[in-house]
Image (cartoon, grey):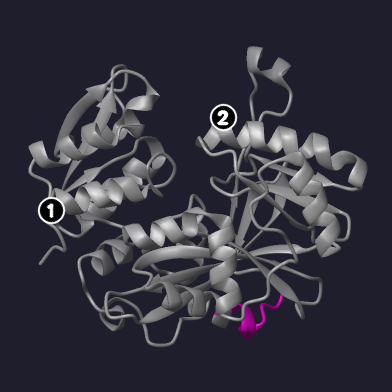
């Protein structure tokens, strides 16, 4: 029996196609949403039905329009994918009110992990190591005084409390650069996420960026699908992701990730991110991404698991033991995902041919 009858896919592009394939593999019908100009997109053709939600990309951020599309098309569930409204507690709450199952964690969990300082506090409660840092600092004067009062050692990093993707984040090597970094980060965070709150913490240079894939069910059971190495980055944005990591991952990191998921009452799949010092002895908590990740496919390939189907089954209330082995399986291969970035704007006006043979 399929976990849901009909699922609205509240996204577009690659992840919409990925969700469509998972829905049909499980026997669920699926409904696509689209804006003017996207009528010929592959996922639109593959879905059982499609709904026009307006013009322009901002239509994908309209909670009311998205939920109405789900209700009007007879959907009993909604998958947000990644990006857009995937971490929106407003969408999760609106789905609950409309009796449409949000395929993701609860609104309260989304709210808790949507603020990096609140997530830090939860990590501290779970005795998970964090970098020494401030709370929210509202102005330059408070920022400078808090950094001095706490004795933070440079380099430090100014980070947006909400959002992600490397935006609203600057590394500062000396106190003389703190004012400019604060002003730039608050402006960037406000423009990108509608929230200009920032905080400051000590920067871990020359560390590995390790993320743990966690899974949780409605009974409170939690497990993991091991980890990914996302250390190769450009301007704090991931470029290469590898599963499994080609370095030893201490059991303490896996336990810390599962402990946070259990403490929060996490349901479906998510990612807990850490920085790990060379040698793997020390690590600190970074953040939780309460959704499917862009790089989920390397975990799927390496560990032979369909994370999107598993996510849907867990959201429907199936117990973890019914959809995932009691002991996380070992990797059967290594998988690498690389993202293509255009670094020089001049290249945008040229035809670029990439030989991948």
Q: Residue at x 81, y 71 (%)?
A: 278
Q: Residue at x 30, y 32 (%)?
A: 62
> In front: 335, or 225?
225
Q: Which residues are magenta?
A: 246-254
- Where residue 275 sits: x, y (%)? 70, 65
Secondary structure type for disc 2? helix
Marks 1/2: CA distance?
33 Å
Question: Can you tell which quarter of the image residue 52 is in?
Answer: top left
> In front: 79, or 148?
148
Q: Is residue 252 magenta?
A: yes
Q: Residue at x 42, y 72 (%)?
A: 264
Q: Mark 2 Cα within 10 Å, few/some/many (few <14, many 20+)?
A: few
Question: Can you tell which quarter of the image residue 344 is in?
Answer: top right
- Where residue 280 sits: x, y (%)? 75, 77
Residue tagged by mark 2? 191
Quarter holding the C terminus is: top right
Question: Can you tell which quarter of the image residue 74 is in?
Answer: top left
Q: Is residue 202 above or below residue 248?
A: above
The label shown at residue 99 is 1
Q: Is residue 305 left or right of residue 237?
A: left
């Amino acid at each position: 029996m399929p976990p849901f009858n009909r699922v609205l896919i509240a996204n577009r592009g690659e992840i919409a196609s990925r969700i469509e394939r998972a829905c049909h593999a499980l026997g669920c019908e699926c409904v696509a949403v689209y804006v003017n100009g996207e009528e010929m997109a592959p996922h639109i053709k593959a879905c059982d039905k499609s709904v026009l939600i307006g013009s322009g990309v901002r239509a994908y951020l309209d909670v009311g329009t998205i939920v109405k599309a789900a209700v009007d098309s007879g959907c009993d569930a909604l998958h947000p994918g990644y990006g857009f409204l995937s971490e929106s507690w407003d969408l999760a709450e609106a789905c609950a009110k409309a009796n449409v199952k949000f395929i993701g964690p609860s609104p309260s969990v989304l709210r808790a992990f949507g603020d990096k300082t609140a997530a830090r506090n939860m990590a501290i409660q779970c005795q998970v190591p964090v970098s020494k840092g401030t709370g929210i600092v509202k102005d330059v004067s408070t920022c400078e005084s808090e950094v001095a009062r706490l004795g933070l050692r440079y380099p430090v990093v100014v980070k947006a409390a909400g959002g992600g993707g490397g935006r609203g984040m600057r590394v500062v090597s000396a106190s003389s650069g703190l004012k400019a970094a604060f002003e730039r980060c608050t402006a960037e965070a406000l423009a990108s996420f509608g929230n200009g709150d920032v905080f400051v913490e000590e920067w871990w240079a020359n560390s590995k960026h390790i993320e743990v894939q966690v899974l949780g069910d409605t009974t409170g059971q939690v497990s993991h699908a091991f980890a990914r190495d996302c250390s190769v980055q450009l301007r704090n944005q991931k470029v290469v992701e590898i599963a499994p990591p080609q370095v030893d991952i201490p059991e303490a990191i896996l336990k810390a990730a599962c402990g946070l998921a259990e403490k929060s009452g996490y349901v479906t799949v998510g990612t807990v991110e850490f920085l790990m010092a060379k040698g793997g002895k020390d690590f600190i908590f970074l953040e939780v991404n309460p959704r499917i990740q862009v790089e989920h496919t390397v975990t799927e390939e390496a560990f032979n698991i369909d994370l999107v189907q598993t996510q849907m089954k867990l959201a429907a209330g199936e117990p973890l033991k019914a959809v995932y082995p009691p002991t996380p399986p070992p990797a059967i291969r290594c998988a690498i995902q690389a993202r293509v970035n255009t670094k020089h704007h001049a290249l945008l006006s040229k035809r670029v041919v990439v030989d991948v043979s």
